[in-house]
Image (cartoon, rainbow, N blue to C red):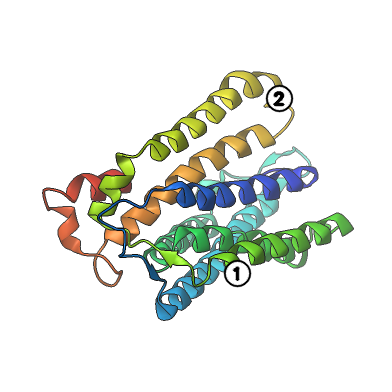
């Protein structure tokens, strides 16, 4: 876990990952076969997506704090080491499993609402954590934390309100075929690869031993790409999600279905 003095970096790169995902989806092309098929997001689908991502954010927050609580209680102040290995503590495993279930709920949210709405709302876990860490783990809360929460709330509100009701392309196999054939898709991947190379080859040897932001930035880069893939995968999955399970085996659909899943 990052020390409290680096909480700002955790917040910053969590927001960057979610925001860059939203921007990445805004670059995706609208080709001929989807032109005219754009529609405003269903109010019911959007509501379900909002509810799922809110529940997932709360679940992720609670489970991560439960894991941190295990490490705090397992710390021996005399030796400065763990009393027992944390994998032998049942609460830690329960929190890990619950965290995985929360992430599945987050994945389901991407099947109902666009990533441009779901990804920014993922920042709610940062807001939830700010209060959970204070009241549950007894971590300090500073005035700058309050400012950070206000900025997060304002940023998320601006992004979400700007996207609600806007036309959204249905994520289908024909649409994904257009995406992977477009220059903007490869520009998006190239920008992520270039930034990741800069972090690994330049920043990591110089700063990683002293600052956690290097690894957080690398996580944010991967998070942007994996959220985009998760949106595609969730949209192709059949009931209870909105896609069709035939995409998993059809000649045209299986590369996108299994590729995005991997």
Q: Is residue 222 left or right of residue 173?
A: right
Q: Is residue 163 left or right of residue 170?
A: right
Image quadrant occupied by the N terminus:
top right
Foreground mark, 2 or 1? Answer: 1
Instruction: Identify the residue at horizontal 65%, vertical 67% (top origin).
Output: 157
Q: Is residue 33 left or right of residue 69?
A: left
* Sequence-wise first label, 2 or 1: 1
Instruction: Identify the residue at horizontal 29%, vertical 39% (top origin).
Output: 181
Q: Which residue has dot 1 on it?
A: 161
Comparing 199 with 43, the one in front is 43
Q: Residue furthest right?
A: 143
Looking at the image, can residue 262 be seen?
no
Q: Is residue 63 left or right of residue 145?
A: left
Position of residue 258 relative to residue 97, above or below, is: above
Badge 2 element = helix
Label 2, residues with CA under 10 Å away: few <14, some 14-19, many ≥20: some
The residues tagged by marks 2 and 1 sit, at their Cα atoms, a distance apart of 37 Å
Which image quarter: residue 63? bottom right
State the image coordinates of residue 218 (x, y, percent, origin top left): 57, 35
Instruction: Identify the residue at horizontal 52%, vertical 63% (top origin).
Output: 117
**CB within 8 Å, label 2 to label 1:** no
Looking at the image, can residue 9 be seen?
yes
Which image quarter: residue 9? top right
Q: Which residue has dot 2 on it?
A: 207
Instruction: Identify the residue at horizontal 60%, vertical 69% (top origin).
Output: 161
């Amino acid at each position: 876990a990052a020390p409290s003095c680096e909480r700002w970096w955790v917040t910053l790169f969590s927001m960057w990952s979610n925001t860059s995902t939203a921007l990445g989806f805004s670059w995706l092309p609208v080709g001929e076969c989807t032109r005219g098929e754009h529609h405003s997001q269903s109010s019911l689908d959007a509501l379900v997506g909002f509810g799922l991502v809110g529940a997932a954010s709360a679940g992720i927050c609670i489970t991560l704090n439960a894991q941190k609580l295990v490490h705090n209680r397992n710390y021996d102040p005399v030796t400065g080491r763990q009393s027992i290995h944390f994998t032998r503590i049942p609460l830690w495993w329960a929190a890990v499993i619950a965290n995985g279930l929360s992430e599945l709920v987050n994945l389901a949210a991407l099947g109902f609402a666009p990533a441009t709405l779901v990804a920014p709302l993922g920042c709610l876990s940062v807001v939830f954590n700010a209060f959970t860490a204070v009241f549950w783990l007894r971590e300090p809360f500073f005035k700058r934390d309050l400012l950070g929460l206000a900025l997060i709330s304002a940023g998320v509100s601006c992004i979400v309100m700007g996207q609600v009701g806007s036309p959204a392309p249905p994520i289908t196999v024909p649409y994904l075929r257009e995406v992977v054939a477009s220059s903007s898709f490869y520009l998006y991947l190239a920008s992520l690869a270039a930034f990741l190379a800069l972090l690994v080859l330049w920043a990591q040897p110089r700063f990683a031993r002293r600052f956690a932001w290097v690894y957080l930035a690398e996580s944010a880069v991967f998070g942007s790409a994996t959220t985009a893939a998760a949106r595609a995968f969730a949209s192709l999955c059949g009931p209870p999600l909105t896609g069709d399970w035939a995409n998993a085996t059809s000649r045209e659909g299986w590369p996108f279905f299994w590729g995005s899943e991997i």
